[in-house]
Amino acid sequence: MLSRVAENLYWMARYLERAENTARFINSTTQVLLDLPRGASIGWDVLLKVAGLDDLYGQHYAAANEADIMRFLILDERNPGSIIASIHSARENTRTFREVLPMEIWERINGLYLYVRDNAARATHGRSQRYEVLNGIIERRQSVIGLLMGSMSHDLAYQFIKLGRNLERADMTTRIIDVNSAVRLPDDPAAAETARERLWMSTLNALSAYQMYRQHVGVHVAGPAVVRYLLTDPHFPRTVEHCLGEIENCLSELVDYHKPLDIARHAWRRLGAIDFEALSTEALHHHLDQLQADLAALHDVISRQYFYLHQKSAIQEQGAGQ
């Protein structure tokens, strides 16, 4: 497979996953704000900090208010991680290599783009409309993945799609969990405990994990148990451990996979070393930062291993023509 094709498929999957998880991220934080008891608080700027977009936001907006942050995360194409920019990029990647994918995939992704283009502005006109539009994005994106899984040969092209999807998903799962570290809890112990339970319930709901958590862990929602489940459960498809397992499976289908596999297993060992019962908010934030750094390193190695060949060729051709 051409490295240029592999890179575009990998990024198509990452962009689509990023758009869906940004929608989940926003809906989760909105629900947290609605559920928090008196005395607890969280600022909208936490979305920017956890997503690593606070510096870019500051270049274009003067104040961190809800309306501007929503516009930046959903509508603003100056933010390459915004929902509309991510879906537009996924669409362009898909259009370029339509012959590699089932024909219906282009139609679904183009339909998703048209839906976002026509409805994204409504997401800035109140929380109820925003929730409706973002859920529409999540549902349409999930239909794309379902179609890919059911109608595309699981060949090398599919492995690069799966690789990008799981790497982005693992990273975004850590960021959604990390929102809780920015909440200021009330001073009253009973109110603080209620707030914690609601926060973790919102986190589970953001990842569509609440029902599976109840089945496999228990009905009581407690921070250490939720974090352990979302980071280390091997069976639920949005946990970091499951995503790392899927990444390993993808790498085993490729050539020269030893360097990226070493980094994936390093991240896996980091998960295994976490003491969830003695985990403070600050320690959790630190562990999540380290996992995000591991995933960024994994992306860098995958890029050097499989995608730089066509980039080097393009540079060499450009130099020869000058």
Image (cartoon, rainbow, N blue to C red):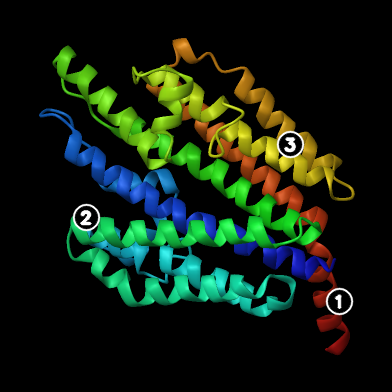
CA distance separating discs 2 and 1: 47 Å
For label 3, count other residues whose C-alpha is less than 10 Å away and answer few (under 14), some (14-19) or many (20+): some
Q: Secondary structure at mark 3?
A: helix
Residue for point 50% across, 22% down? 228
**Residue lying furthest left in this view?**
38
Residue 316: assigned label: 1
- The amino acid type found where label 2 is placed reads Glu
Q: Is residue 212 left or right of residue 44?
A: right
CA distance separating discs 1 and 3: 30 Å
**Can you give x and y, in whole percent of width and height, for residue 157 in the image?**
76, 61
- The amino acid type found where label 1 is placed reads Gln
Residue in the foreground of this view, choosing between 74 and 136: 136
Q: Secondary structure at mark 2?
A: helix
For label 2, count other residues whose C-alpha is less than 10 Å away and answer few (under 14), some (14-19) or many (20+): few
Residue in the foreground of this view, choosing between 322 and 54: 54
CA distance separating discs 3 and 2: 37 Å
Q: Within the image, what quadrant is residue 209 found in?
A: top left
Residue in the foreground of this view, choosing between 129 and 40: 129
The residue carrying mark 2 is 66
Q: Quadrant of the N terminus?
A: bottom right
- The amino acid type found where label 3 is placed reads Ile
